[in-house]
Structure formats: C-alpha cells, structure tokens
Amino acid sequence: MLKFIKHHLDTIDGVEIFPVVSFLIFFSVFVFALIYVVKADKSHMDEMSNLPLDNKN
Amino acid sequence: MEMQLEKFSYDNKIVRNFLFATALWGLVGFLVGLICAIEMFWPQLTNGISFLSFGRLRPLHTNAVIFAFVGNAIFAGVYHSLQRLVKARMYSDVLSKVHFWGWQLIIVAAAITLPLGYSTGKEYAELEWPIDISIALVWVIFGWNMMGTILKRRVKHLYVAIWFYIASWATVAVLHIVNSIELPVSFLKSYSMYAGVQDALVQWWYGHNAVAFFLTTPFLGLMYYYVPKAAGRPVFSYRLSIIHFWALIFIYIWAGPHHLLYTALPDWAQSLGTVFSIMLIAPSWGGMLNGLLTLRGAWDKVRDDVVLKFMVVAITAYGMVTFEGPMLSLKSLNAMTHYTDWIVGHVHLGALGWNGCMIFAMLYFIIPRIFQTKLHSQKMANWHFWLATASIIFYAIPMYWAGIVQNQMWREFNADGTLTNQNFLDTVTQLIPMYATRAIGGSIFIVGVLLMFYNLYKTVKSGKLLANEEAEAYPLAKANVKHEKEHWHRWIEKRPMQMLLLSIVVILIGGAIEMIPTFLVKSNIPSITSVQPYTPLELEGRDLYIREGCYNCHSQMIRPFRWETERYGDYSKAGEFVYDHPFQWGSKRTGPDLAREGVKTGRLYKPNDWHFNHLLVPDSVSDGSIMPRYPWLLNKLDSKTLEGKITAMRKMGVPYPEGYESKAAGDMRVQAKEVAKPLYDNIDGLMISDETYDKIAAGEMKLEETEMVAVIAYLQRLGTDIYPKAAKK
C-alpha cells in the first residue's frame, strides 16, 4: 500500500518549506489564542472557571 | 416563555465500575512490574517459566499500567466529571456498559496473549491485530458516548477539562490507528506495514504521544476539574488554561523524534523533535502552575486534606518530569542517557508521581462521595500518601544513579585508546544494588496501594452506592445568556464538534510534517544495495526474537560515537533496516547492542555454540548475567505460517522473488543444517541435560529443527549486510 503512494510521489522539491509552513501555522494559532485571551471579558472568564463548583455534586 | 427545570440523574454506577477496575488492574500491573524488577537482580526467580520471563512480562506491565490502570482511571474521571460539567446524564447507558465491558475484555485478552508471546514487537503497541481492532471499536464507542453527552448538555459553554477530553480522545484514535497498521499473517501474528526508519518514526510519534494524550492531557483535564473541586476554589487562570491547551496539543505531537536522537533517523527530524520538546516546557509548566496556584491562599487546606496532598505531589511530579523530559531531548544530554536506566527513572517519576498520585487522589475523592459516606480512615490514607511519595524517591534515585554509572562505564577509555570496560557484563553487575533498591521502592509503592485497597473496601462497605444521583438544571435555551461580543473562542467553546475537528487538524499537522518527507523523500533513507531480505530461517528467528521480547533489553542501533563503534562496530545506517517489519532498534541496553552481532570480524562476534549455551543458560558463559534462561527454545520450530510470512513481506515491498514461498521451507532446512553443524561438532560442550543429549544422540531430537537454531541464524545475520559476503547460496 505504501509502495503505491511512494510510486506516485518520489521526491518532494523544496521540502524546506515544510518547517516554515508549520511554524507559521503554529504561530498564528498561538497568536489568535493570545489575542482572545487578552481581550476576553473578565466576567465570562470568572463564570467559566466556576463551572466545576457550580454543582452540589 | 417559561423554561421548565428538568430533572435527571447522573450515572454513578459506571463510575464505580471504572474506579474498581482502575484499582484492581493497577494492583495487577504494579505486581507484574515488581516481578520484572526482581528478575533484574534475581533472574533465577522465574527460571524456565516462559510466560514469566522478563521479555514476556515487561510488555504486560507497560500495557497493564497504561491501558488498564490509567485507561480505566481516565474513563472513571471523565464519566464522573463530564456528566456534572454538562449537567446531563451520559448519552447512553448501553454504550457505557459496552464501553466498560469491552475495555475489560481487551485487558483480559492482553493479559493472556502477551505472556504467551503474541506480540507485534512495538513498545506500548505489542497487542496483536484482533485486539487492536477491538481497541479501536471500543474507543469509538467511548467517543460516541462522550460526544453524545456533550451534545445533549444543559451548560452551553465547554469547561476547559472537556476540551482536554475531546482532544485526548481524537488524538489517541489517530495515533492508535496509524501506528497499528499491520498486515496479518495469522490470527495472532502480523507485521507492521512500516519498516526500519519509517517504522521507528511512526512508532515514536505514537509512543511519545501516548505519553502526551493518554498519560498527560486527560489528566490535565481531570486536574482542571478535581483540584478546584477538592480545594473549593476556581482554577487560578482560565486564560492560561486556554493558551496552554492549544499550545500543548500542537507542540506535543512533534516531540516523538526525541526518542531517536543519534539514531539513523534523518537529522532534520531529530532536530525538530529536540526543538519542539524544549518548546513544550512552556505549556506544560503553564498547566503545572495553573494547578498549583489554584491552591494559593489555601495551602492550609492541603495540610488537612489527603486528596489535596496527593494532587500537590502529582502536579509537582508533573512539573519535574516535564522539565526533565525536554532536558533529555537535548542531544548532548540524550547521548548520555539514551538506553540507560535514567530513562526508566524519568518514566516512573511521571508514572508514579503524576499518574499514580492523581489517580489515588481521584479514588479517595470520588468513592466516599458516590457511596454517600466518609473515607474509612484519614490516617491510613495519609500513610498511603507518605509511602507513595517515598517510593518515588526510592525508585527514581537508584535509576538515575544506575544511568550515570552505565554511561560512564560504557564510554570510558584507557590511555592507550582501548575501552576500559570491554565486557558489557561488567557494567551490568555494577547495577545490581540499584536494581534491588528500585524493587524496594516499587514494593513500598505497592504497600501503599494495599493500604488504599483496605481503606476503600471499608469505605464502600460502610456506605451505599448512589447509583443514580438526582440532579436538576434548565435546558439549554434558558441557560444561554446572550453575550454582546461573541469572540471566536467562545464560538468554538459552544460547538463541541468543531472543537473536535479543529483539534484533529492541529494534531495532524505535526505528524504529517514529520512523516511525509521521511516516507516520500528517498534521500532520507539512502539505500544500500548490498542489503538483502532475511532468509526464511532468519525471518522465523526474528519472529522468535520478537516473541521473547528481546528488544526489551537489547538494542539494535549503534550511534555514531567512538565509544559505541569501538564496542559494537560500525554505526547503524538507515538503509540497513529497509526490510525490518517491524524495526527492532530497542530503547534500552540491559544487555549489549546486537546490531552487528553477526559480523565475524566484530568484537562482539560469538560462534553458534556460544549463542546456544548463552540462550539456554546465560550465566554459564557470562558469569553474573541477569539474562533469563530460554530452555523452551529447544522446542521444534513451528513453521506452518512461513509461506504466509513470505507472501506478507512481499506485499509490503520486501523483494522476495515471486513464488519464493514454495521454496522457502526447503531453503530453511538447508540453512538450519548449516547453522546446527557447529552445534553437533561441539555437542559435548553444549549446556544440555543428559536426557536431551541422549535424545539427540538417538536421533529423536534434531537440533536443526529447533527454534534455537532459527534464533541463532537471525543473530548471526545481524549487521552483516553492509560487508562483502563470502559465498552465499
């Protein structure tokens, strides 16, 4: 099965782009998460963090 | 429009079942571990009992503690906390039951097959293909039940613990399926689809992420629920939990190659593994700090609450281990610690500290509550706490010490340029006191567990299970308070399926980027024209090597260090392993590396009769050896599946000529006679009993038909492919 896939794509030109692309993806996910977290509404954060306690269990 | 308060009940019965299973299998897994630990300084304990030998038991230990102990604990915690966080009963009681019993059946199947030697030869993935399929099915049922519960929730937003549960579920599914792609040869035998370097990469992408997404992220989720619950206060920083969640699940995936530093894995992959492992410190410590700082201002509570004590030790151990791990991923430190007992120390710091203590905390927290009673004895639980904590020290420190001794002895050179410790065995005998101390550490841990058993037993007896716990909450429409600004993350918090899909995309990125070039770019695995497939006899021998779990103590990967090439021979090249389904590079050197064992001019080369005696009675040729004895290798080799093996290998790209399988048995018999000849020539020097000697002399037993000869043939093949061959058939 693997041979079949390999047969069709023998080399990847410019494989160096891979780590660059991955870094960009990571960076953007991280940046979005950071932005959200910085701009998040405090009361919503408090409400979320109290969810486990919101229960007599 | 008035919304009616809905009444429903939480299923506590399933939680009880999973908790009992956790405790029971935990004890089994720990005891198997203790047997393994004792075997390492007292190998005679289990002489001649095949299903108790170290190579068979170690996979049972790892699989039991990971999948049976930790696995059941995850399910217990998820089923308990999820219902309460979403204010809904589990989606389906039937699915809950199928999940529970399915998982326990899998464990029983593992407990039977592993000691009998049915193994794929891949660490923490030894279970053979029918069990692998069962795991996938039960895992789907778990996910179905979990996502179904989330979808019928009465709390709009998903608390952070639930993201961890979702991401863990998704990632474990991907890891298990991809790493378990194997071609069956018979009902309980299969070969990994991958070979050599590629198999190594897939295996350790899986292996490290089993640590990440089975041993870590579910527990972070559980931490985010049970620490606030136990402390009665919210998590320190919800914002931090969001950041570290995404960072963690993204970065963790890439760290796999840190298990393969200085091996034949391409350099760029090794570097990625190192860099991402270092980056991992940040989100890991984010989690640790969040957990510990939740207790700020409430440390006096910890003094009086054994549950909090266990949690503090667990989270602290987590912090230690997630600093140690990245440090061990630095190539310079890795060069000194890989293959040594240091790694075993590292593992158990995490396993006993983070996983063990967190699970104990959960058991002590949940059981009194669902049985509507108080814990039978706080004092006993405190004793357990101190024993568990002490045992971690008695385990880890001897292992660190042993690791340092091994590395120092392996690499020491005399002034004249020769190795100081020429005989590998000398480095092993030095470690016996450390192995004994470690076994004491493990025993202390088990004593604590026995106390816990008694304590919880008395607790359960004093109470009554609240099988269905009454609860009430408004359905979703009323509970949804409109927010003015709907940020994207809030959007995803409300949409669990999108969360699931996005997590899957994120975790696939790391795997794809590391594996696709390794698989598709030819230059990553330079081929060596002289490398040939294994002969039929060698293939059978290799499968016996896997059956006996030799990879648990012997590596087959020589690193490019002078102190390794002096001892073992030329360092291992990627192209040598292209036909190795599965790869057998190993992770540990309790015994020497075998990668060039067959090279006749190599320092490690031994003749056939030496191997015969060494396998039969190791300490007869290696004084003080802790290797188990393998008398059952004198049994007749069962080669009924040989044709199927050749065909399977060919299907996976190993260039056996078409139709070779019909010739294979004949070739095998010819080679077996060649391998057996030196044994017959030195029959008086073989460590066989008089009875066996007589049988051979009478022609009742033929050495060339034994499993022993197949194993010897395999060992004598190792590492020879890159050297010019003498006349070959």
Image: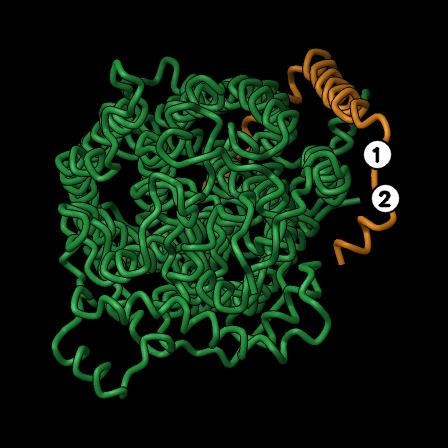
Chain colours: A orange, B green
Q: Residue sitting at 72 percent across and 42 percent down?
A: B519
- Tell me residue B123's x, y (percent): 46, 49
Task: Give the distance between the C-alpha atoms of the residues marked 2 and 1, in whole angstroms.
Answer: 7 Å
Which residue is the site of mark 1?
A12
Question: Is residue B481 placed above or below B332 in the rendered structure?
Answer: below
**Residue at horizontal 74 percent and vertical 20 percent from the top:** A23
How crowded is the residue under tag 1: few (<14 C-alpha within 10 Å), some, or many (20+)? few
Residue at the location (80% across, 23% down)? A21
User: Can I make out residue B384 in this image?
Assistant: no
Number of marks in the rendered image? 2
The percent position of residue B472, horizontal first and vertical second, equals: 57, 49
Are the residues at dot 2 and dot 1 in contact (C-beta closer than 8 Å)?
yes
Please provide percent x and percent y for residue B111. Answer: 37, 65
Q: Quadrant of residue B356?
A: top left
Q: Mark 1 lies on which chain?
A: A
- State whether residue B144 is above or below residue B697: above
Res. B516 visible in picture: yes
| Amino acid type of the residue that numbered disc 2 sits on in the rendered structure | Leu
In this view, the residue in front, B446 or B86, is B446
Q: Is mark 1 on a helix, strand or loop?
A: loop
> Residue at label 2?
A9
Q: Residues within 10 Å of mark 2 (few under 14, many from 20)?
A: few
In the rendered structure, which amino acid carries the disc numbered 1? Ile
Mark carried by residue B272: none
Q: Which residue is drawn at 18% across and 32% down?
A: B394
Q: Identify the chain of the residue marked 2, using the numbered disc in the image.
A: A
Tell me the SS state at disc 2. Answer: loop
